[in-house]
Amino acid sequence: MNDAPRTYDVVVIGAGPVGENLAERTRAAGLSTVVVESELVGGECSYWACMPSKALLRPVAARADARRLPGLAAAAAGPLDSAEVLARRDEFTSHWKDDGQVQWLDSATIDLVRGRGRLDGPRQVVVDTPDGGTVRLAARHAVAVCTGTTAALPDLAGLADVKPWTSREATSARQVPESLVVVGGGVVAVEMATAWQALGARVTVLVRGGELLGRMEPFAGEMVADGLREAGVELRFGVSVASVVREGRQVRVGLDDGGELTADEILFAVGREPHTADLGLDTVGLTPGDWLEVDDTCQVTAVPDGWLYAAGDVNHRALLTHQGKYQGRMAGAAIAARATGRPVDNSPWGAHVATADHAAVPQVVFTDPEVGSVGLTAQEAERSGRRVRAVDYDLANVAGASLYGDGYRGRARMVVDLDREVLVGVTFVGPGVSELVHSATVAVVGEVPVSRLWHAVPSYPTISEVWLRLLETYRG
Ligand SMILES: Cc1cc2nc3c(=O)[nH]c(=O)nc-3n(C[C@H](O)[C@H](O)[C@H](O)COP(=O)(O)OP(=O)(O)OC[C@H]3O[C@@H](n4cnc5c(N)ncnc54)[C@H](O)[C@@H]3O)c2cc1C
Ligand SMILES: NC(=O)c1ccc[n+]([C@@H]2O[C@H](COP(=O)([O-])OP(=O)(O)OC[C@H]3O[C@@H](n4cnc5c(N)ncnc54)[C@H](O)[C@@H]3O)[C@@H](O)[C@H]2O)c1
């Protein structure tokens, strides 16, 4: 081992979307920056999450839209060509090669060290490289942990022998199983059930609780459940997996209600764990395996001297690529300001803080129907002590929606803070609503008064006209 560390202004551990964005910001501010990556530059999102999953889902949505249009429905009646869909998915993951992303790092003059990085005391990082060597890095100003998450798995005897699918296999499988059991009721479960059912698998979803998408407005989960059932997915609520065993090519799944089912594959989509178990957290007074708690500049609060940052999934603020990248931009700006002695603007919505994480996080669930939401649900807003009113509108009554597809079903809700007359949350459910979400994000983040929204006239005949209907419903 060469003991002399290579010193940089900033060391970033993890070159997922968040690490890349943070590094781009610090480098653009003139700070020398190195990123350490143990797998592929681009992270989970590029290879086993957002990109491949959306590549699988896009043809599903397009076919569903076509099937709602007389004149086109017959042409779209057949099955998807799964080989073509999987091949397009492979293109979107660059066939699990990161040359393009490495080129981008080069063009941005950000150094890359391949290998597993771990902290080795304040400002020190040791990288175990693929050739069995070690590289020592030291940070003048900051180390940023952007190591993301891995799929959580339940504690079931013999689970490893079953070789269950996690989100990785669900997004990278090369063949369509005849049957698939999906465990979980969150975003990964509903998106992957949608994709694999459409690709030809018989999908059964086992949900521990009584609803899907439990963190969203209740009608979102209900409408997605209807859509899944109509697509042929079997949904079972209030059941947990008690045992799993692989018998030949089949997995036998025992349920806590005494029932049993078999399938070719079982996907566990039961949440995420922070990628911090082997990160040397103990060398800086933190507990391995924990989420890293941060302030709004993404500085890790429990570590003195302000040199350690954590952005993206690993800080558990919002497990979404766009929100993590936002944190990366804010943390990068804060690191640069502190390094160069410039003032840090950490007042709410300031230049160096991820304020939107608290109450303005947008998300799209790419099911049929789609769900798009931002900010607080009505229940969350009430629990926060605000005096609110939930205003609902049936999207079927919007001209643009009925033109979009026959038999259009959808719903919208805006949550109005009655004391300030601004929106604190908006949810849309329906085909094609994903592109509406940013309008809602602008309204929530901008705290645009309802009286001014009244002047934001939606084009006719678009689905956006739901904005006008929501405002009319609110005003009475
Ligand atoms: C199936 C699925 C679909 C999703 N779809 C969406 C979506 O449509 N939209 C959305 O916004 N979000 C989506 N997400 C969430 C999204 O993938 C994450 O929020 C995002 O990847 C987080 O980015 P990150 O950079 O924090 O972490 P990651 O993308 O996980 O990247 C972390 C990187 O750090 C590396 N690393 C870890 N430990 C070390 C170490 N010790 N040394 C060196 N390198 C290390 C990893 O190899 C990895 O490359 C999805 C998630 C899943 C599972
Ligand atoms: N389109 C998107 O934006 C998108 C897509 C996929 C994933 N993601 C993000 O990735 C993250 C992870 O998604 P996820 O669906 O894995 O997690 P999640 O937290 O959204 O859902 C986990 C589900 O598993 C259930 N569960 C937990 N433990 C269980 C157990 N032992 N047995 C049975 N059920 C159990 C939970 O009740 C919940 O329904 C989410 O935070 C999500 O925001 C986003």
Image: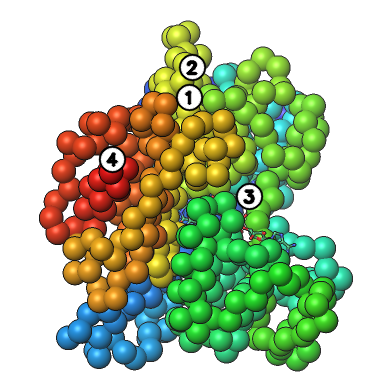
Q: Secondary structure at mark 2?
A: loop
Where residue 76 sits in the image (x, y, percent)? 28, 86
Please give the label number shown on residue 142.
Answer: none
Pointer 1: what residue?
353
First reached walking from the N terminus: tag 4 or tag 3: 3
Pointer 4: what residue?
475
Which mark's residue is nearer the viewer, 3 or 1?
1
Which mark's residue is nearer the viewer, 4 or 3?
4
Residue at image point 21% right, 37% down? 454
Residue at image point 24% right, 36% down? 453
Query: Which amino acid, mark 4?
Result: Arg
Res. 17 in view: no
Q: Secondary structure at mark 4?
A: helix
Pointer 3: what residue?
149
Q: Is the CB–ligand 1 distance for label 1 below 8 Å? A: no
Q: Is the CB–ligand 1 distance for label 3 below 8 Å? A: yes
Looking at the picture, tell me which residue is in the foreground, 134 or 269: 269
For the C terminus, which image quadrant?
Answer: top left
Give the mark count.
Answer: 4
Left/right placement of residue 197 relative to residue 269 reads left
Pointer 2: what residue?
346
Q: Secondary structure at mark 1?
A: loop
Q: Answer yes or no: do the residues labelled 2 and 1 have beta carbons within 8 Å? A: yes
Q: Is residue 56 above or below residue 139?
A: below
